[in-house]
Image (tube, rainbow, N blue to C red):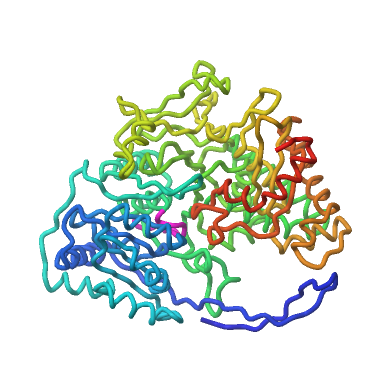
Amino acid sequence: MVVEDKQVQVKVDGKMESTLKRWTFSKLSEYKWMTYNEVVDYTTNLGAGFRKLGIEPKGRIVIYVPTSREWQLCAFGAFSQSMQPVTAYDTLGESGVLHAMNEAAADAIFVKADQMPILARIMDDIKTVKHVFYFQDAYGMPDGCAEALEKVRARFPVHTLDEVHDLGRANPVARQLPAGDDIALVMYTSGSTGSPKGVLISHQGIISVAGGIHLFIAPYLDYGTDVLLSYLPLSHVLAFFVDVYCIYSGIRVGYGSPRTLTDESVRECRGDIRELRPMVMLGVPQVWSTIRAGMLKQVNRSSWLVRKLFYGAVELKNALRNHSLPHQFMDNIVFKKTQDATGGRLKFVITGGAPINRDVQKLMNAALCPMIQGYGMTEASGLLAVQLPHDATFNNVGAPCPSVEMKLVDVPEANYYAGDGKGEVWVRGPSVFRGYLGNDELTRETVTEDGWLKTGDIGQWTAQGQLAIIDRRKNLVKLASGEYVALEALEATYKNSLYIHNICVVADGRMVQPCAIVNIDPQQIDQLADKAGVAYRNPSEIAASPEFVRAVLADLHAVARHNGLTKLETLAAIRVDAELWAPENGKLTPAMKLKRPEIAAHNHTQLMEMYAQMGISD
């Protein structure tokens, strides 16, 4: 680790003052690789070690670590003996990981040393776990974790992952490989509307998705040569199935972290992207929206001529791609700097988890590389539809994956009918999950007797046979006029504002127009406040400033006009939440989706103010 003291400017009582702030940066080594044969040997020994410790086939191991090589080694070690990993986001708090352990009746838990204090605090409430496994990175045991380790060791046998591997190597057993119908893992959803649900995914489901995507994507990859940068949570189905596909097909996987992706977040080394120089990279819409905002802020600080050339080049390159005309010549002229920042080898990037905004995808296509949008869900083992890298269209998620059959079903209350090419997306096939852990009633509500999975998403077929996701069924809200608005679609549009870090649109049957709680990155408050001529002393004060709120709303209205939103989709009022939403403070899921009830509860007073402003009595 590298520690630096920096002078930073902060606003105090309306004036900018200089203060000293200590920053800690990571110092990383070069990537170190394992061959496929080495992985097979390691995971076989690891599985044997699990067996020696008394974990039987179909036993469960909770994986509560960040995305890393160790995450996958533990999972494949469990697979080698027909054991079932139980996924738990490493950002889950005490109650979340305790819920996963106890509901799944886990035999063991695998943690990173950093999380040992969490385990120490909840260990008296753990019901079935008999062993604790852990690993630590090159920096060693973090402060306070050694003491927590000793507390945990007083209650459970504790082993490093390498110790379990060595135990298995000394006590080899034959691999006990699972059948296709066997449960591969219990994957917990991110819990955007309540407690996470344990989804039972079969080995057949995982491999059917890998085989399905292979039929689509094989012509665009060089197997044995291409590299994927994996940094999204492996406890999320998007990152997991992409990793598994790479392992299935022979693509190298290098692991990174959101905290060390760029050069700005490390010292005396390169960030993960420039060090690995990947050909493929994943991201959720929030990540790409942040990257887009950063790019455009740099461009908008340039001269009028530079801005004109850049925006014109984005439109021209997309038009050339759309007509299958040569466009690569523009990369060295206009976009070389942005492409070099990602290593200069990206073939395409994948976005999933929620709909991506057209303007974000358009910019990524031009300034970086083709962005393909995928659509999937945990209950379908990951993938349902995906665009192909040569697809230059927008606002769709491509054609259905060969691992499923798909249909649209009428939603009459919202005036969506399959005969018109609109409705709820239902899918069927080998990748459909085997049910929710311990909740047969919810399983029966979600999967029909003849095997159709009700996704809850509203879809529409395009003229080319692609699927466009309009919104979530539960997020379609009828206004006082009787017309529906799609909350997620509106949020994706309003995120085009360069000042908006995140937004939660609110609507119900009493309203003629929606309102919203807006989240603004504190680093951008200065720029917008100066533009609006509003003085302030701290972020909380300006969030409540009527002049500032009007300036933000005016910017959002400009976004609405630019994107052709109707009057009923235009925000009637907003309030600003000065606290950045994040998984750590419970406002976002680990997959970066809004936790609407928590955001509403946190902003109850502001919501009441907006209701009063709109003439609504609560």
Q: Is residue 534 above or below residue 504?
A: below
Residue 329 in sight in this render: no
**Residue 196's spot in the image, x, y percent?**
42, 49
Q: Does the magenta stretch include residue 299?
A: no
Q: Is 513 placed left or right of 397 in the picture?
A: right
Q: Residue at x 61, y 57 (%)?
A: 581
Stretch in magenta: 224-235
Q: Main secondary structure of the magenta part?
A: loop
Q: Is residue 329 above or below residue 267?
A: above
> Residue 442, located in which quarter of the rendered image?
top left
Q: Is 167 placed left or right of 7 in the picture?
A: left
**Residue farthest along the right direction in this orientation:** 533
Q: Does the magenta stretch include residue 228?
A: yes
**Residue 220's spot in the image, x, y percent?**
43, 46
Q: Residue at x 46, y 65 (%)?
A: 256
> Residue 574, located in which quarter of the rendered image?
top right
Q: Is 156 placed left or right of 476 in the picture?
A: left
Q: Which of 266 and 108 is in front in this view?
A: 108
Q: Indicate the quadrant containing the C terminus: top left, top right, bottom left or bottom right.
A: top right
Total marks placed = 0
**Residue 265's spot in the image, x, y percent?**
57, 71
Q: Residue at x 30, y 40 (%)?
A: 208
Residue 332 in sight in this render: yes
**Residue 6's spot in the image, x, y percent?**
68, 81
Q: Nearer the viewer, residue 302 or 305?
A: 302
**Residue farthest along the front direction in this orientation:** 618
Q: Is residue 331 above or below residue 150?
A: above
> Residue 490, located in which quarter of the rendered image?
top right
Q: Which residue is drawn at 46% across and 54% down?
A: 280
Q: Is 438 placed left or right of 509 in the picture?
A: left
